[in-house]
Image (spheres, grey):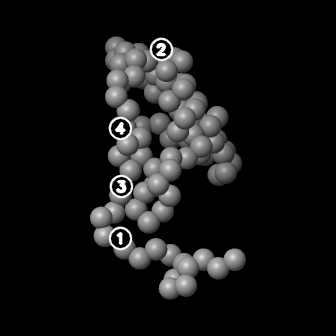
């Protein structure tokens, strides 16, 4: 697995579209070495009690994979969705602004 950490020095840039692009390019390099030309994609946001939408890097990672000539099969969302949730942070009265 490629992680954005070793490409991006600053913490805030780890989930950035640019880091995702670099990671995707890395992935395609590895795949080409193994002779893999087509992939299925599993997309996962944080899920659970946290955000259910994928981060800023998701779209650009997909785009980079497609642009690098990977054939993309099916895209599947594997974000964990709780059926009966543990308690969210923010307490009884929620987030008050």
Q: Is mark 4 on a helix, strand or loop?
A: strand
Estimate the x, y position of residue 5 in percent, counting from the top left.
57, 44
Query: Which label belongs to residue 48?
Result: none
Estimate the x, y position of residue 26 in percent, counting from the top left.
50, 27
Above-or-below relation of 97 to 20: below
Q: Mark 4 points at which residue?
A: 76
Query: Which label belongs to residue 85?
Result: 1
Mark 2 or 1 closer to N-term? 2
Q: How would you rate the neighbour count of disc 3 (Cα within 10 Å): few for under 14, some for 14-19, many for 20 or more?
A: some
Q: Tell which tag, 2 or 1, sits nearer the viewer.
A: 1
Above-or-below relation of 81 to 23: below
Residue contact between numbered discs 2 and 1, judged by CB atoms under 8 Å: no
**Viewed as shown, does residue 34 lie left or right of 95?**
left
Q: What element carries label 1?
A: loop
Mark 4 or 1 closer to N-term? 4
Q: Is mark 2 on a helix, strand or loop?
A: loop
Residue at image x 46%, y 74%? Answer: 88
Q: Quadrant of residue 81?
A: bottom left
**Viewed as shown, does residue 32 lie left or right of 10?**
left
Q: Is mark 3 on a helix, strand or loop?
A: loop
Quote the CA–CA distance across marks 4 and 1.
Answer: 22 Å
Query: Which label belongs to residue 69?
Result: 2
Estimate the x, y position of residue 37 in percent, counting from the top left.
37, 15
Residue contact between numbered discs 3 and 1, judged by CB atoms under 8 Å: no
Quote the CA–CA distance across marks 2 and 1.
Answer: 40 Å
Mark 4 or 2 closer to N-term? 2
Q: Which of 84 and 61 is in front in this view?
A: 84
**Viewed as shown, does residue 81 lie left or right of 50?**
left
Mark 2 or 3 closer to N-term? 2
Residue at image x 33%, y 63%? Answer: 82
Residue at image x 67%, y 51%? Answer: 12
Q: Residue furthest bottom?
A: 92
């Amino acid at each position: 697995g490629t992680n954005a950490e070793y490409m991006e020095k600053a913490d805030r840039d780890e989930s950035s579209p640019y880091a995702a692009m670099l990671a995707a390019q890395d992935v395609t390099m590895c795949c080409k070495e193994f002779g893999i030309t087509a992939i299925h994609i599993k997309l996962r946001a944080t899920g659970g009690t946290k955000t259910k939408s994928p981060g800023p890097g998701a779209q650009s990672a997909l785009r980079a994979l497609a642009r690098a000539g990977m054939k993309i099969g099916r895209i599947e969302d594997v974000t964990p969705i709780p059926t009966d949730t543990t308690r969210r942070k923010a307490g009884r009265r929620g987030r008050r602004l």
